Amino acid sequence: MKKIILSIIIFFNFLYSAQVEELPWPKGESFLTFLDKYSISQKLYFDLEKEDKELCSEIEADRKYYLYTEDDGTLNQVLIPVSDDIQIHVYKDINNEFKFQTLPINYTEYSETVAIEITESVSHDILKATGDVTLAAVLKSLFKDSVNFRKMQKGDFIALKYTQKAYLGKPHGLPDLTAAMVEISGKPYFRFKHEKDDKYYDEKGIGFTKSYFFQVPLTYQRISSVFTKKRWHPVLKRFRAHLGTDFAAPKGRTIYAAGDGRIEFAGVKGGYGKTIVINHGNGYKTLYAHQNGFAKGIRQGMSIKKGEHIGYVGNTGLSSGPHLHLGLYKNGTAIDAMSVITKPKVDGLEAKERASFLANSKAIQKKFDDEVKNENRSIPTKLERTTDKSEINIL
C-alpha cells in the first residue's frame, strides 16, 4: 500500500513540476504497440496475470490518457483509463525499471436540477446551461418515441435532474439522467427513472423502457472468472479488476448471441483475439472474445437474433486456455453480465412500489415547476460530493 501511495505522490510531483500531456488513444494502437513505441520490453505485458492482460484489451480508441515523458522523449509514466472506475498505471520505479499496476479513478460526482428555456436549439441550450455535450443525446434517446424535438420553439422548456461524474474538472462518462421534462407549447412530457429496475416511466407510472434480459451465450456454463469492477486485494496488496465474465469451455464449443442486435465488430481485437461485438440498442453491447472462429456468414453490420450461432470457443489472442470472455456494456460502461442474465423479467411497477414512485415523481414535478418559474431559471443548482472513499487520491 505504501508503495502505491509513494508512486502517486511521485506522479503529483511530476504533474506540478512538468507538463503532463492529455492525449486521445490512437486508433489502431494496442498496449503492446504502445510499449514498442517507448522502447519498453513486452515482457512487462506477458508477465501479467490473465485479468490484467484482458484489461489492456479494454483500452478504447480516442479515450483520453495522461502521459509524462522525459526531455529526451522517453516514457516516465502513463495513466490509461479503461473504464469509469479503473485505470492502468505504467511507471519507472526507483531502480529505473518499468512496473504495471491498476488503480481506481478517484472521480467526484455532482447532481444538478436545471430548467432550460429554449432560445436556439435543444442541443445548444443544454450545452450552454450545463457544459455537458452528451446530455442532449441522452434526453433525445429517452423521448425518441413520443416527442418531436423539431417542433420545439423559442420559449419552450426542458427540465433535467441528473448526476454526472467529473475527472480532472471535466465530465467523466455519460450522465445518469434520473428525471426529465420536455414542455412543448405548454404541454409537458415526463420521464422518471426507477432505481430498482433502472427503467423509465412517465408521471402515471407507465413504462417506456424496453426490457433487456440476455441469455447465457453457450451451453457449457462453468464460470472460471467473475466480473470485478474494482477491488482491493488484501493478500496481493493491489487493486484488481476484471471487466467481464469468463466461461471455461472446451475449444470448439458453440457460442450464441446473448440477445437481438446488430454485429458492430467481427475481427481481431488486441489481446482479445478473434472477437465479436453486438450492439443491442438502448446503449447495450456485448463482447465475445478469444474465439477460435466465427460461424459461417457472420459479418459486420448484419442483424442477429438471440440464440443465433455466432462463433466457437477458442483461445486466440493472449489467453491461458480455451474460454469465452463475455463483456456487457451499457452506454460504454462495463457492467456485470450475470446481473442481467439472472435477473427475473418484470414489466411495470409492482403495486407496493407504485405509490412511492408516484409520490416521488410528483415531488420532482413540483421541483421542475419551481425551476421553470424561477427568474434565474437557466442557472443550475449543484451539489457536489466525493464518491470514491479510497485513501488514495489519484489523477
Image (cartoon, rainbow, N blue to C red):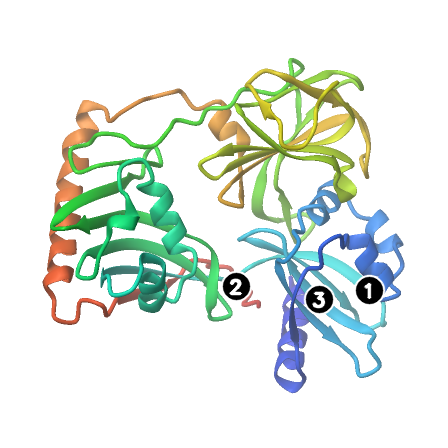
Residue 142 percent across, percent down from the top left: 34, 42
**Looking at the image, is mark 2 or mark 3 earlier in the sequence?**
3
Residue assigned mark 1: 98
For residue 391, the mark is 2
Spatial CA distance of label 2 from label 1 is: 24 Å
Q: Would you name the residue on which mark 3 appears? A: 78
Identify the disc placed on residue 54.
none
Q: CA distance from mark 2 to mark 3?
A: 21 Å
Point out the tag, 3 or 1, that comes first from the N-terminus: 3
User: Looking at the picture, does residue 94 appear above or below residue 336?
Assistant: below
Task: Pick the residue in front: 355 or 96.
Answer: 355
Label 1: how many residues lie within 10 Å, few (<14), some (14-19) or many (20+)? Answer: some
In the rendered image of this protein, does residue 212 appear above or below residue 193? Answer: above
Height in image: 38 above or below 198? Answer: below
Q: Classify mark 2: residues with Cα within 10 Å, few (<14), some (14-19) or many (20+).
A: few
Q: Residue at x 66, y 82 (%)?
A: 19
Q: In the rendered structure, which amino acid carries the disc numbered 2?
A: Glu
Q: Which is more foreground, mark 2 or mark 1?
A: 1
